[in-house]
Amino acid sequence: MSNSVTNKLNFYGNTTPFDLIEKYGSPLYVYNENILKEKCRELMSLVSYPNFSVNYSVKANSNLELLKIVCEEGLNADAMSPGEIFVNIMAGYKPENILYISNNVDKEEMQYAIDAGVTVSVDSVSQLALFGKLNPGGKVCIRFNPGVGAGHHEKVITGGKKTKFGVDMDLLDDVKDVLKKYDLKLIGINQHIGSLFMEGDSYVEGVKSCLSIAENFSNLEFIDLGGGFGIPYHKLDGESRLDLADLGSKLTPILTEWANKYGSNVKFKFEPGRYIVAESSVLLGTVNAIKTNYSNKYAGTDLGFNVLARPIMYDSHHDIEVYSQTPSNETEPITVVGNICESGDIIAKDRILPVLNEGDILGVLDAGAYGYCMSSNYNNRLRPAEVLIQSDGTERLIRRRDTLQDLIRNFQV
Ligand code: LLP
């Protein structure tokens, strides 16, 4: 059945895609609170090493209401910018539970983080020196690049010899010199080698290399092992899930033995973004036009790449469900496109879907991570609203749709 995934999960609670679109307009990001909480809980029991935290990587989705839920579930958070530090604090995270993983920041941004009281991770010897000048005698964390990376697309591989991230291990002496010069205390190291692994083994390898880097330093308080935990984007084709239990059972002895050898109860941090939020959301959109151009059939929708950028940026696949008042049992290949003035504005190419009609609603699955947060006002389109299906099945608006006035807000000087 074309809506088998959401049916099974009772995703829409007491409401329906039709009611939601009528009430909040199309397109619309819909989130499910139960699923969000379930994903938080899965990762909160990843390993049985006692001293660990799950730092939600808020770049995947920084909706304030969702952040509050994740915070209430007991997760900590990372941040990538002063804006993320700001919303994290607004959501209730304590500064000491936020790790600011900075990248090429200026003096003001670094100072903002220091003043906010969050732990700062720096990404180069040059930025370590900046931190030292601003905060001599302070505590700092360093992101290292283990020389290897992984990820679902070259644009999201963040470790390895060809990426801008982290400090090259050959620069260890320079790192030590700068630490000494500014009397800095290195309290943690972190890494993130890339986004989306479905087999735990590459993560385990990354963890081992991070631990071998950590051996160069004494008295570390924490080691942040990064994120990247994948979700099955091809559910309708039966793609299996990442086996978290297996991954956890491999990680626990590695972490325990390492900590025993290191001689301290060091804290390990995991930093997932996608795994926490991706499956908690379906992006709804409407079929406005059906057309055939030179034997290619198109469904013209309001799901442009201003709303969901992943397909045009990384050729990413998202499963699609169809909600129709006149459902068809027939299927056919169709290319689902948006309403943006570029021919790359394709959300699904030659996808086999039930025969579509104008007015049908499409549900783009697994849209919660890197969905809304990467949306834009390109073509002066309005970013959609976001609605939460709460645990009791009722819905709540958690971000309003942009208005035309929002488009000129910054001109009103
Ligand atoms: N930590 C750091 C330092 C990161 O740079 C990232 C993601 C994460 C953690 C979380 O990674 P995750 O668990 O979500 O894989 N826009 C792309 C993904 C970019 C990921 C960037 N960094 C996408 O839509 O696939």
Image (cartoon, rainbow, N blue to C red):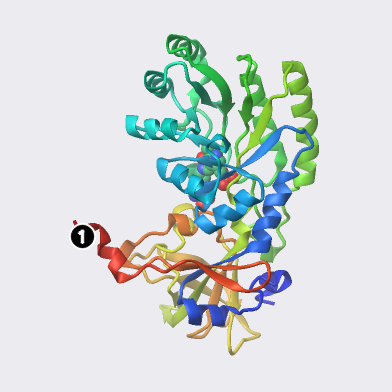
What residue is shown at x 55% (from left), y 82% (from top)? 19
Task: Residue 59 in the image: state x and y as whole percent.
Answer: 50, 47
What residue is shown at x 58% (from left), y 72% (from top)? 395
What residue is shown at x 74% (from left), y 22% (from top)? 259
For label 1, the residue is 412
For disc 1, the neighbor class at 10 Å (few under 14, some 14 to 19, many from 20) is few
Q: Dividing the picture into quarters, in which one does residue 111 lie?
A: top left
Q: How many marks?
A: 1
Q: Secondary structure at mark 1?
A: loop
Looking at the picture, tell me which residue is in the foreground, 376 or 89.
Answer: 89
Q: Where, quadrant-wise, is the C terminus in this rendering?
A: bottom left
Q: Is residue 240 left or right of residue 97?
A: right
Up-down relation of residue 133 to residue 241 (above or below)? above
Q: Is residue 3 left or right of residue 91?
A: right
Up-down relation of residue 29 to residue 114 (above or below)? below
Task: Residue 347 in the image: state x and y as whole percent.
Answer: 48, 65
Task: Residue 92 in the image: state x and y as whole percent.
Answer: 55, 48
Looking at the picture, tell me which residue is in the foreground, 181 or 29.
Answer: 181
Task: Residue 377 in the image: state x and y as whole percent.
Answer: 34, 62
Looking at the picture, tell me which residue is in the foreground, 330 or 357.
Answer: 357
Up-down relation of residue 146 to residue 406 (above or below)? above
